[in-house]
Image (tube, helix red, strand yellow):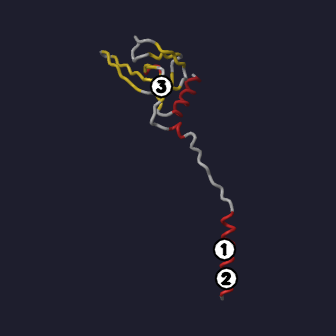
């Protein structure tokens, strides 16, 4: 009886040792595009052939530079100006301020890329 249990235990240990040595395929998850869909930042895509970056949110201020149609830019701030019955929304970017009528607002970078591709095909 002891020999029988010894053989069963040995056979079980051998089978377990072989089964634990076999490789199982580990699936890896690609998280490289996770930043593309984050919604904690908003992005703008320039829709006009040329958009002016102003020093301050006002058409009378100095021009910093110009952006081109399809440029993707991260929004850093927003300001609304109300002058009588007119309402102008300005968005702040690294290079200055642009009016809302020159850009499309996107909720993530991937959406901004897709929007830029569509705009450039028009």
Give the position of the N terminus as an image quadrant: bottom right
Q: Nearer the viewer, residue 43 or 49?
A: 43
Q: Residue at x 39, y 18 (%)?
A: 57
> Pointer 3: what residue?
104
Q: Nearer the viewer, residue 65 or 49?
A: 65
> Pointer 2: what residue?
6
Q: Nearer the viewer, residue 2 or 15?
A: 2
Q: Residue at x 46, y 31 (%)?
A: 42
> Pointer 1: what residue?
13
Q: Secondary structure at mark 3?
A: strand
2 and 1 marks in contact (CB < 8 Å): no
Gap in angstroms between the C-alphas marked 3 and 2? 76 Å
Q: Earlier in the sequence, mark 2 or mark 1?
A: 2
Q: Secondary structure at mark 2?
A: helix
Quarter residue 71 falls in: top right
Q: Earlier in the sequence, mark 3 or mark 2?
A: 2
Q: Residue at x 39, y 15 (%)?
A: 58
Q: Give the vertical position of 40 relative to 82 (above or below).
A: below
Question: Dot 2 surroundings within 10 Å: few (below 14), some, or many (20 or more)?
Answer: few
Q: Residue at x 41, y 13 (%)?
A: 59
Residue farthest to the left? Answer: 84
Q: Secondary structure at mark 1?
A: helix
Q: Give the vertical position of 5 relative to 51 (above or below).
A: below
| Position in image of residue 67 (x %, y %) | 52, 18
Q: Give the vertical position of 2 relative to 50 (above or below).
A: below
């Amino acid at each position: 009886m002891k020999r029988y249990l010894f053989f069963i235990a040995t056979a079980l240990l051998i089978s377990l040792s072989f089964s634990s040595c076999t490789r199982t395929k580990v699936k890896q998850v690609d998280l490289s595009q996770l930043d593309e869909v984050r919604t904690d930042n908003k992005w703008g895509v320039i829709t006009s052939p040329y958009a002016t970056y102003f020093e301050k949110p006002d058409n009378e201020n100095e021009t910093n530079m110009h952006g081109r149609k399809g440029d993707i830019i991260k929004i850093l701030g927003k300001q609304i100006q109300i002058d009588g019955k007119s309402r102008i929304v300005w968005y702040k970017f690294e290079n200055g301020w642009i009016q809302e009528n020159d850009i499309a607002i996107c909720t993530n970078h991937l959406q901004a890329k897709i929007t830029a591709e569509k705009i450039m095909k028009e």
